Image (cartoon, rainbow, N blue to C red):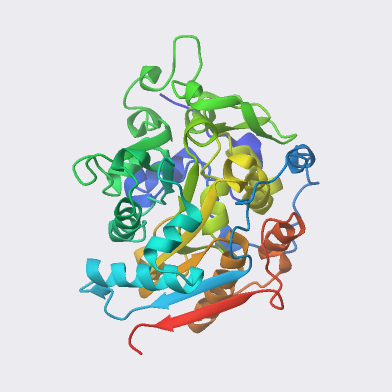
Amino acid sequence: MGFKAYKSMNTRFHVDRRDFIKTGSIVSAGLLLGTPQLWAQDNAKDEPPPRPKTNIDEVLKIPRTKQSMPGAFPGKTVEIFDDKSMADGLPVGERIELMFKTGIENLTGLDLNESFKLFFEPDDIVGIKINPVGPGLISTRLEVVDAIIAWLTGNGLKRENIIIWDRFDYQLADAGFTPERYPGIGLEGLQTFNMDAYAGKVDDSVWLNADGTHISSDKFDPEVYYWADVDGPADKEYLHQHVFNDKHSYFGKLLTQKLTKIINVPVFKNTGNGISMATKNMGYGAICNTGRLHRPLFFDVCTEVLAFPAVRDKMVLNVTDGLRAQYDGGPMANASFAYLYKTLYFATDPFALDMVCQQKMVKKRKEMKIKVNEHPMFTDYLHYGEKLGLGLVDSQKTEHIYVDLRS
């Protein structure tokens, strides 16, 4: 096909088509698609360009609800470790069920039945946002999602009222989230991406309409968007990856028009000296046209997108999957840095959760003799979330509970 790489983005996090294809496949490399691959080369002296304007001030004027973030337990995080949760590198379902039960009970102070009532109504449409990057290595474990579904259905929620989702449709199946594995459960990607077209093996018709629009355009809500004064590149390669290339990053209609509640299930992994966990899983997973935002607004996207009602008022729970974690080489999967962590984290407050996990990640990187940059740029966005009333990260305002199931 001969698409040119979108070098006009001028970003230190750039990944071009040749780098992408050299990985062998999108499955083995994880989702590159404009995702910053070079965070390991971060340099705090490399100043970003002036911060572009966004529509965050308009969004903050929208009234909150009783379940708006930071949710029922601001600043509270729970960490559950179970040495028996992984056996021969594979998840042990019954142990993960116990971890989930223990985590919910320690977070809420209620059993699984009463805690369900705290978050959900029987007729809710609940979306489970996974992270499928690095299938079989560091992607969201099926067994963690199984435990969540058992909790929901065990309290009367119909299977057809549950939707497992991510931004890209094909990655769900790659990570094992298939109709055969989850009968009766919805499976939805916000947009289509075709690797064969990206690699130039088939023509554009698999993703491009005759009028030049992306076939996924109608899956995004034209009335709900994160606006930033940054244009996306105009070439087809960028359009294929990002659906639109103007100054608007539209939210998926799944979030704005269908889901009433969201459970966020990210993976414990790094993005260079930062992390790619709760806030990033939603910040870059809920919208399209994100490549243009990487250099000027990378971390702030993780805060400002979560301020929109489509996320702020619906995301009632975060469960970070650290059964197998990764301390370097992220956000794509890299087996050289993956390890058995055997841990799950729980919070209604994604900013408190990410601050805890950022600190845990820094400690792990130091233990593994990885050069660590502790510049404030890697946590400023979390403090920004507190400033916007989305979470609590000040250690004097937070509470962390650790449970070792061996005890």
Across and down, in percent, residue 174 comes to 29, 45
Across and down, in percent, residue 338 comes to 37, 69
In-front residue for pair 243/101 = 101
> Can you say which quadrant of the picture contains the C terminus?
bottom left
- Residue 330 visible? The answer is no
Please say if 355 is above or below 170: below
Seen at 74% across and 58% down, the residue is: 384
Q: Judge left or right: residue 143 versus residue 402.
A: left
- Residue 137 visible? The answer is yes
Across and down, in percent, residue 158 comes to 31, 42
Seen at 23% across and 66% down, the residue is: 93
Q: Judge left or right: residue 41 versus residue 300.
A: left
> Can you say which quadrant of the picture contains the N terminus?
top left
Q: Judge left or right: residue 197 versus residue 269.
A: left
Across and down, in percent, residue 113 comes to 38, 61
In-front residue for pair 329/134 = 134
The tally of labels here is 0
* Residue 377: quarter of image: bottom right
